[in-house]
């Protein structure tokens, strides 16, 4: 049973009733494919990452989250900062009534060797997807625009 609903710039989204949460996510690539996790809390696919701990540097947090959620350990130097997504309409609402706005620090990372994936309890599965496969997935709304931008940037690189 799903316990969370995610919104992006949706007028039907509930208003936040908890402090804004700062998190980090990664566009993690291998052989031109993007790693996503199928989230246990909503059933949709999303980027690997999660909430930053109090006082935690974003790059440390994404390295920790990647390790916790996938079993992949990378040094902080492997992550390239892309941008901070601070739109007011990125909302998470939980079955217990908690609603918060999320701010995402977005990173990119790539590995050459195929990684051994070990899903955590936060994921029902982990998988790398091609751009074509991504267009057919149910992606969490709070990550949909980030994945779409990755698809578009990959297409532009191919044309160059």
Image (cartoon, helix red, strand yellow):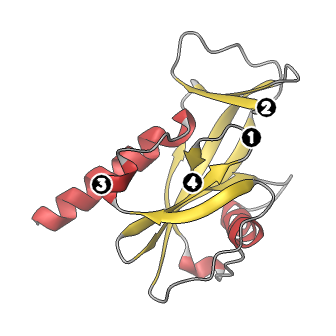
Q: Which one is in front, 55 or 25?
A: 25
Query: Would residue 18 be seen by someone viewing this image from the given angle?
Result: yes
From the image, tell me which residue sits under label 1. Answer: 41
Q: Is residue 138 above or below residue 16?
A: below
Point out the tag, 3 or 2, that comes first from the N-terminus. Answer: 2
- Whether tag 1 and tag 3 are in contact, CB under 8 A, the answer is no
Q: Which one is in front, 129 or 88?
A: 129
From the image, tell me which residue sits under label 2. Answer: 3
Give the label, 4 or 1, closer to the camera. 1
Identify the image quadrant of residue 72: bottom right
Give the label, 3 or 4, closer to the camera. 3
- Asked which secondary structure carries label 3, the reply is helix
Which residue corresponds to the image point at 54% horizontal and 30% vertical from the top-left? Answer: 87
Could you say which disc has been placed on residue 47 in the image?
A: 4
- Whether tag 1 and tag 2 are in contact, CB under 8 A, the answer is yes
Point out the tag, 3 or 4, that comes first from the N-terminus. Answer: 4
Point out the tag, 1 or 2, that comes first from the N-terminus. Answer: 2
Q: CA distance from mark 3 to mark 4?
A: 17 Å
Q: Is residue 11 above or below residue 106?
A: above
Q: Quadrant of the C terminus?
A: bottom left
The crowd level at tag 4 (other Cα within 10 Å; few <14, some 14-19, many 20+) is many
- Asked which secondary structure carries label 1, the reply is loop
Q: Give the residue at the far front of this rendering.
A: 1
Which residue corresponds to the image point at 64% horizontal and 60% vertical from the top-left? Answer: 125
């Amino acid at each position: 049973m799903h316990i969370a609903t995610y919104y992006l710039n949706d007028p039907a989204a509930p208003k936040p009733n908890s402090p804004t949460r700062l998190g980090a996510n990664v566009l993690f690539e291998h052989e031109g494919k993007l790693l996503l996790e199928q989230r246990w809390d909503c059933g949709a696919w999303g980027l690997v990452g999660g909430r930053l701990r109090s006082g935690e540097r974003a790059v440390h947090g994404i390295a920790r989250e990647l390790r916790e959620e996938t079993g992949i350990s990378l040094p902080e130097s492997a992550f390239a900062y892309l941008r901070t997504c601070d739109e007011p309409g990125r909302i998470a609402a939980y079955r217990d009534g908690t609603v918060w706005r999320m701010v995402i620090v977005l990173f990119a990372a790539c590995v050459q060797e195929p990684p051994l994936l070990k899903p955590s309890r936060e994921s029902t599965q982990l998988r790398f997807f091609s751009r074509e496969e991504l267009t057919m997935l149910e992606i969490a709304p709070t990550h949909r625009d980030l994945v779409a931008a990755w698809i578009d940037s990959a297409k532009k690189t191919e044309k160059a």
